[in-house]
Amino acid sequence: MVSERKQADIAVVGGGILGLAHACVLARRGRKVVLFERNPQARGASVRNFGMIWPIGQPAGEMHALALRSREIWLDVLTASGLPYLPTGSLHVAHREDEAELLREFAEIAPGQGYSCEWQEPGEILRRSAAIQPAGLRGGLWSPTEITVDPRRIVAGLPDYLRSLGVEFRFGEPVRRIDLPTVETATEQWQVDAAIVCSGEDFETLFPEVFAYSGLTRCKLQMMRTAPQPAGWQLGPALAAGLTLRFYKAFHICSALAPLKERVAREMPEYDRWAIHVLASQTEDGAITLGDSHEYGACPDIFDKPEIDDLILKEAATFLRLPDPRIAQRWNGTYAIHPNKPFLEAEPAPGVRVVTAPGGSGMTLSFGLAESVISRGGF
C-alpha cells in the first residue's frame, strides 16, 4: 500500500555515480532532493570500473572541457567529503615504434587543444613508475590531470556526504511511475517539481518509449583485480599502453593512428574482435585493477569468456610488471552506450529529464555533465 505523500523539489532516479552527481550539484544549489535507487546499494557499472577520472581520453573541444570541469568538481567534493583519492596522473607507454610515433605527435598537437601532457623518454618514464616493463620501452606520454578513486568506496560513501547537504535517500525503492508532480514507488508517493532519471542500462522500467527509439545499446566488459600488492608497493600513475591509443577519441587527431590500427588488426585480430585494450589502476588497499574488453549488443552474453581474460593478461605482461600478479577477483559490468553520441539526454515529459549513457566515461564526466544538465535545464 502506498503511504502518505512526501515532498521534495526534485527527484533523482538512480544511485550510480551519475545520479549521485546530479543530487550533489542540486543540493549544493539549495534544492531539496530525494534520490531513489532500486537496489539496496548501487551495484552496476559505477562500482565495476577502474575508478579513473580520465580527461586525457576525451576528444578535444567540448567533451574535454566538460571532463576538466568535472575533475574540478570531483576534487571539491572529495575534499569536502573526506573520501580518499589519488592524484596519480597517467602514463601511456610505448613499446612499439608506431605507438611512440603517435604519442609524440599527440604531445605536439595536444597542448594547443587544451591538454596538459608531454612526451617523456624511457628514463623519465621509469622514474615515474616502477611498474613499467623496461625492455623495449621507447618512452611515453605523461599527463598530470588524471585522478584515481576506488569506485566501490566512493559510491558507497558519497550518500553520507550528500545526507549532510539534506539529500534524502530511498534505497531498495524502484520508481514505477513518474507523472509530475507525482513520483511513485511501491510504498511511497512524492510530490516534486521536477525529476532527473539516471537509470543506466535499465531501458525498460521508466519511459521505455524514449529508449526504444534512442539508438542506445549495451556494452559488456570483463575486468580483474589482483590482491593488494605487498609491502605498500605503489603503481604510481594510472597506466595505459599501445592498444588504448586506438580506443579513446582524444587520439583521433593524430595522423599516426590509422597505421597503428591497421597493424593491430593485422597482427592481433582477436584484440579487435573483443575491442580489448589494457588499463591498470590501483585501489586504496593496494590492489591492481586490470581490464578490459567490450562486447556490444542489446543483450550481451551473461557468461564470461576465459579467453578474453587471458588476452588481457597477455597484453598487460608486455608493459606491466607487478610484485604479485595473481588475480584475486574477476567480474563483468554492463553499461549503456550510444554509437554516435557521448551521452543521451531526453525530455520525455515537461519537467522530466533522462540523462544516461556516458559510455565508459561515467566516472570522468559525471559531475561536469550533471552541472551542465542542471544549468541548461533550469532545475
Image (cartoon, helix red, strand yellow):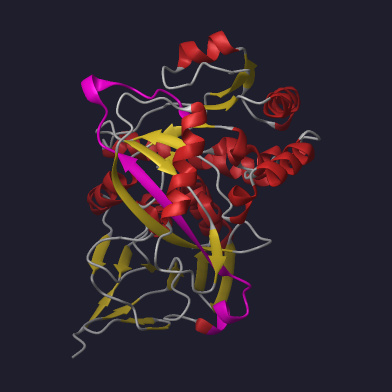
19 in relation to 105, above or below: below
| Residue at left offset 63%, top offset 43% | 248
Task: Report if residue 20 is visible in the image.
Answer: no
Place of residue 184 in the rendered image (x, y in percent of width and height, measured from the top left): 32, 83
Instruction: In this rendered view, identify the residue nearer to me: 298 or 106.
Output: 298
Numbered marks: total: 0
| Residue at left offset 48%, top offset 76% | 203
Residue at the extreme bottom of the image, as rendered: 1
Asked if the magenta segment contains residue 237, the reply would be yes
Place of residue 285 in the rendered image (x, y in percent of width and height, measured from the top left): 24, 33
Place of residue 9 in the rendered image (x, y in percent of width and height, measured from the top left): 37, 68
| Residue at left offset 44%, top offset 40% | 313
Q: Report which quarter residue 20 is drawn in.
A: bottom left
Instruction: In this rendered view, identify the residue nearer to me: 85 or 334.
Output: 334
Task: Report if residue 221 is visible in the image.
Answer: yes
Judged left or right of residue 61, residue 86 is left
11 in relation to 74, above or below: below
Q: Report which quarter residue 168 is drawn in.
A: bottom left
Judged left or right of residue 98, residue 39 is left
What segment carries the magenta color?
Answer: 209-238
Q: Quadrant of the N terminus?
A: bottom left
Q: Report which quarter residue 2 is drawn in.
A: bottom left
7 in relation to 136, above or below: below
Place of residue 117 in the rendered image (x, y in percent of width and height, measured from the top left): 62, 23
